[in-house]
Image (tube, rainbow, N blue to C red):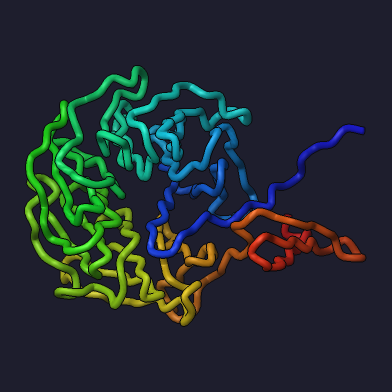
Amino acid sequence: MSWTKKSTFASLPYTQRATALVLNGDPKGKNFLYCNGKTVYIRDIDNPSICDTYTQHSTKVNVAQYAPSGYYIASGDDHGKLRIWDTVNAEHILKYEYQPFAGPIRDIDWSPDSKRIAIGGQGQSSFGACILWDSGSTVGEIKGHSKAINSISYKPTRPFRIATASEDTTCAFFEGPPFKFKHTMKTHSRFVNAIRFSPNGELICSGGSDCIAALYDGKTGELMSKLGGDKAHAGGIYGVSWSPDSSHLITASGDKSVKLWDVATQTSISQFKIGSTIEDQQLGCLWQGDYILSVSLSGDINYLNKNDPEKPLRVLTGQNKNLTSIVTSYDSSKLYCGSMDGKINIQLLSLY
């Protein structure tokens, strides 16, 4: 008997308390992607029941990012392996594999021409690298931190820059290519979890466990201001994402909320309060076209509503732990899934 795959019931993202989760999107605004275990999940943002997967990492994969061209995805795992694979073929043929350093890769960003890749993580002797995508040759040095790089961002416009955020409580600024350390940004007092250039390249935003969201000049890396004063949130900040036109940004926080900021006035114009339990802490976010997404500690993916901050447009629920049992309902309309965390999730098969 032969079988044909009809649908994929996607896992939710793997989450850890007080740890940033990287949620990325494709350049056309059609898909978003995240990781769990050894798998990268690529989901249609309009219809998330449509899901593709990449399963060729040998260990836990932490981050995946589309090239701006849209033809390739780079993904990084706990062993420090960077795999570059195509998005066109269903087999996701491997193009290149590199090991920029020996240790977990935590974040990846491509240059706007899709020719260079910036990588941050926790190597044994180094915490970052920038390489040519088709040879693996280094393009300068990403140095200047004493602990792991949690987040890395490549300026999408000329003159090119790279910004990093680290567990050593600092951000660093690099000029190139080839990239050289320019200076340290000592804005935060605790782990810096996220850093992102605006799409127009004019600004950088960093978010840290000290509740600070800071804005810097995108060309010089000089501090400009702190959103909301000394504290942008009542809890640590784990995600930052810009609107496509660079006029607004969102921050995701352990205070169980996501804030929408007006960059011109540097004020919060909306606060999306997700819930009241520990599981509602917000660990990542993505502004993808008309959609604003956030990820809770529970793994739930929230589609936030700009017109009604109190009520998400939809919430993607499910499991993010290994399944232990699966059974269909008597009328075959539902699928019951039990997982190692003691939860049972019910999937309506009509949605797939």
Q: Is residue 55 left or right of residue 72?
A: right
Give above or below for 22 relative to 89: below
Look at the picture and state if 188 lies above or below 93. Answer: below
> Which residue sits at x=78%, y=59%?
349
- Is any part of residue 36 visible from this angle? yes
Quadrant of the rendered image containing residue 20: bottom left
Q: Residue at x 28, y 74 (%)?
A: 233
Q: Could you tell me residue 249's position as x and y percent? A: 29, 62
Percent position (x, y) of residue 330? 92, 65
- Left or right of 219? Residue 2 is right
Quadrant for the C terminus, please: bottom right
- Quarter containing the N terminus: top right
Q: 336 and 334: which one is in front? A: 336
The answer to whether one can see residue 177 in this image is no
Q: Position of residue 319 (x, y in %)?
A: 63, 60
Depth check, front residue: 219 or 305? 219
Q: Is residue 274 above or below residue 95?
A: below
Say if 52 sits above or below 192 in the image.
above
> 136 or 228: nearer the eye?
136
Percent coordinates x, y for residue 43 in the rendering: 56, 49
Figure quadrant of residue 73: top left
Q: What residue is shown at x 18% (from left), y 30% (from top)?
A: 141
Total marks drawn? 0
